[in-house]
């Protein structure tokens, strides 16, 4: 059995094209390297320990695959998907031992109880507010009992309309900002229980960062 169909964002193709355009600069800047962010690395390490032995792990919005590979080095059976074909090209080149595919978080057909862990590591902030709850519900269905989800998001109110990113590369996307209580409410409605909540004062978007860990 697979999850029900998720509404597709109206700007999906525009966002996909933007990430294809920034992929080379993202890799050049090495923005996926966890070793430069000790608090984020600690969160990922905790997630890895929590899901070890529960089943496969899916990195949704994996970009060039750095976090995917980091988790694989820690013994997880992990694969990655990303909206951007160019990001996946980089992922396959940089991490040839890993499995990667091109797909949006809204295009996945995840079988029920098929994953021990799922990541949305700063990969879901472009989803409109009416679409994110549907994606979270699909993740909850896809996780085994006790499975964990880790989310990285930009914290704040409203949204930021971006016309450039990562050193001035032209883009066209909206960054939706979330407050912790809003996200926890969505997660609870999707069937998740809270595990951990990490708040940092900065992110690459120039606003505070938010990491939430939840389990079903």
Image: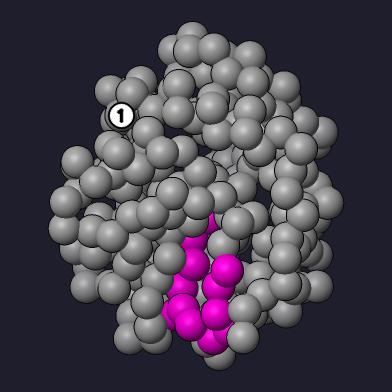
Dividing the image into 4 quarters, which one contains the C terminus?
A: bottom right
Note whether 91 is above or below 53 in the view shown: above
Q: From this viewpoint, is residue 179 visible?
A: no
Residue drawn at (35%, 20%) of the image: 25
Dividing the image into 4 quarters, which one contains the N terminus?
A: bottom right
Residue drawn at (54%, 12%) of the image: 170
Relative horizontal placement of residue 62, taking residue 2 as reference (left or right): left
The location of residue 62, given as percent across then percent down, is 41, 49
The location of residue 17, given as percent across then percent down, is 54, 27
Determine the image quadrant of residue 105: bottom right
Residue drawn at (44%, 49%) of the image: 102
Note whether 33 is above or below 25 in the view shown: below
Name the residue tied to disc 1. 27
User: Camera-side residue: 112 or 42?
Assistant: 112
User: Camera-side residue: 59 or 203?
Assistant: 59
Q: Which residues are magenta?
A: 109-120
The location of residue 8, given as percent across then percent down, is 73, 49
């Amino acid at each position: 059995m697979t999850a029900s169909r998720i509404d597709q964002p109206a700007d999906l193709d525009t966002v996909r094209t933007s990430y294809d355009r920034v992929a080379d600069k993202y890799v050049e800047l090495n923005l996926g390297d966890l070793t430069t962010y000790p608090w984020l690395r600690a969160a990922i390490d905790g997630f890895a320990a929590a899901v070890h032995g529960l089943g496969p792990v899916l990195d949704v919005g994996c970009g060039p695959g750095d976090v995917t590979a980091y988790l694989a080095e820690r013994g997880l059976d992990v694969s990655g998907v990303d909206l951007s074909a160019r990001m996946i090209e980089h992922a396959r080149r940089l991490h040839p031992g890993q499995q990667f595919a091109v797909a949006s978080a809204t295009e996945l057909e995840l079988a029920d109880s098929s994953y021990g862990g799922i990541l949305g590591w700063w990969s879901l902030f472009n989803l409109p507010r009416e679409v994110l709850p549907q994606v979270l519900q699909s993740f909850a269905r896809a996780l085994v009992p006790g499975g964990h989800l880790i989310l990285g998001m930009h914290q704040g109110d409203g949204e930021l309309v971006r016309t450039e990113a990562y050193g001035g590369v032209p883009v066209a996307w909206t960054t939706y900002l979330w407050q912790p209580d809003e996200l926890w409410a969505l997660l609870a409605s999707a069937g998740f229980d809270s595990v951990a909540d990490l708040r940092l004062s900065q992110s690459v978007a120039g606003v505070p960062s938010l990491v939430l860990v939840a389990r079903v």
